[in-house]
Image: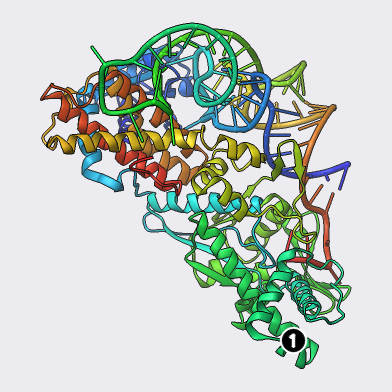
Amino acid sequence: MIKNKIIELLEKAAAEAQAQGLLPPVTLPEITLEHPPNERFGDYASSLPLRLERAVHMKPLDIAKILVRLLPATEEIEKVSVAPPGFINFVLKNSWLGCQVDCVLAEGSGYGNQELSKGSSVQVEYVSVNPTGPLHVGHGRGAILGSTLSKVLDAAGYAVTKEYYVNNAGTQMQVFYHSLYARYLQALGREAELPANGYQGEYVKEIAQQIIAETGDKFLRMPAEQAVAEVGNIGLQKVVAAIRADLDLMCVDFDVWFSEQSLFDGGQYQKAMSLLAERGYTAVKEGATWFASTALGEDKDNVLVRSNGAPTYFASDVAYHYNKFVERKFDRVINIWGADHQGHVSRMKAVVSALGIDPSRLQIIIGQMVSLKRGDVLVKASKRKGEIVTLRELVEEVGPDVCRFFFLSRSADAQMDFDLALAKEQSENNPVYYVQYAHARIASILRLAQEKGIDFSQGDTCLLTHPAELSLIRKILLLPELVESIALNLEPHHLPHYAQDLATSFHSFYKQCRVVSDDEALTPARLKLVQATKIVLARTLDLMGMTAPEKM
RNA sequence: GCCCCUGUAGCUCAGAGGAUAGAGCACCAGCCUCCGGAGCUGGUAGCGAGGGUUCGAGUCCCUCCAGGGGUACCA
């Protein structure tokens, strides 16, 4: 990336200035580049002189002048200038910008890829909703976040494993199994009551009906305990399959569906607990086993194994993270959780530390609440009360592209209102269509060129000097930087904003610059730019998990 | 009470400690002899309040106000 090259040039200039005694030998800060707020300042700006001011006791403008003098001329940079109060501004050469179009065409659909990781592995765990019922709208947010982040990390060069943790072993599952069995009995005309806090949703009745349709009433003729387990197991399979199908609708997929139960069956739960105990982080109080997290600065200890001998879900999570870091040796683990798990963050990090793992290898993203509205009416989603606005319902109403774009547009930290009525109403007049329209328009231009038999492979991109052309190229050059920044900061919400910017630049270029014209030199050059834009737009949409339509 | 997140334009949201705070929607005024008008060009309007750190704060720290979430031997 040109950005990194400029940073290197600055680093060398600063080192050289120190070697020549023009700057005192202080430790240099990390050099960063910004995009200036106004294009008249150029393409990149460094505030290094301002940052050095205090350490070297010199005027920023003087520091800037010294550094600029030591910067060599390069093929990319047109001009380097000093601006008050102490910025160094870089302007890129038009000819270099033009030939970047050829670079994009050469890279094709791989454009934007980075090699940040040196082969390190990262696991992204997301959704991981208890398989006790269908996904609701709020789950969609985590799903889209995880799915998109995985794509970007992959593009940034990490070996990514996308994972869904199937909580199939806990208390909630038992409640679900008993709820399902009760519905099964009721459907067969038997007296039965839902357990306290049972799952009341209609879907439980539907699953019971399906089981009856498929296997008849055979579970009536076995002991209740066995019947609950067997009916429950069938229900579990069905719910997981339904969750999978719902996620599929939104193009959210996984490499691994990890079973919580396997942690117990495979002995990893025991290993993790033993390790914690060996390291002195467990304590027995009041008949229960606790994680002594106060020793690690937590507010309080947490129960691992209840006094009745049953492990808490927290204990499962300890084993799961032991599995992630120790057994599978992921270099980095990213968990995407809902706001209701916020309290779980610090103790999970404490556990990782207690297991002897650097807690910075565990990153947890909390997706804040999604409130549902229909018009002005707030919909309170509660799976157990059966009031669900399902994710499927939403996707079928507005489509996966609108859904993904909408969820992605807000940062994970911000709560969001999802107005179902508005989402549908806006689906014909919203940024999603604006961006996709740009792609379809490009496809249309390229079809026209093809119909006319124009071969633009030899187009001379040096001819691209119109401000609208250069502005579009500058936008195109931002994608690699975006991939890098999202991979480092885990903030994929910049993607939709970038997509809109890029589309705007393209539409503006299209208005100002006739592409297919009588000009036999300019036409192929512009067709190259159009083709490059198509590649970048399609890649951006692809990273967001959206379609890039040839026609609309 | 304690912990986490959030307060930016009428609305929905962006905003690498940097230069004159940006988009979309809405509203107003323009633009179709021409590659897709689902488009383009312009206009209106804003950092919850108060301190502090800094050469420089929407961004960091403190206090307050407002909204949401968490604070179980639930997950």
For the question of whether residue A21 can be seen, the reply is no
The residue closer to the viewer here, A448 or A243, is A448
In the rendered view, does A71 fall on the left or right side of A160?
left
Question: Up-down: is A535 above or below A165?
Answer: above
Q: Quadrant of residue B59?
A: top right
State the residue at coordinates (34%, 37%).
A440
Question: Up-down: is A264 above or below A292?
Answer: below
Crowding near the residue tagged with mark 1, few <14, some 14–19, many ≥20 C-alpha atoms within 10 Å: some
Identify the residue position indicated by label 1 in the image: A227
The residue closer to the viewer here, B64 or A274, is B64
Percent position of residue A340, x then y: 73, 52
Question: Up-down: is A98 above or below A326?
Answer: above
User: Could you tell me which secondary element the residue under label 1 belongs to?
Assistant: helix
Q: Quadrant of the N terminus of chain A?
A: top left
> What's under tag 1, amino acid-wise?
Ala
Chain hosting mark 1: A
State the residue at coordinates (60%, 69%).
A240
State the residue at coordinates (81%, 74%).
A306
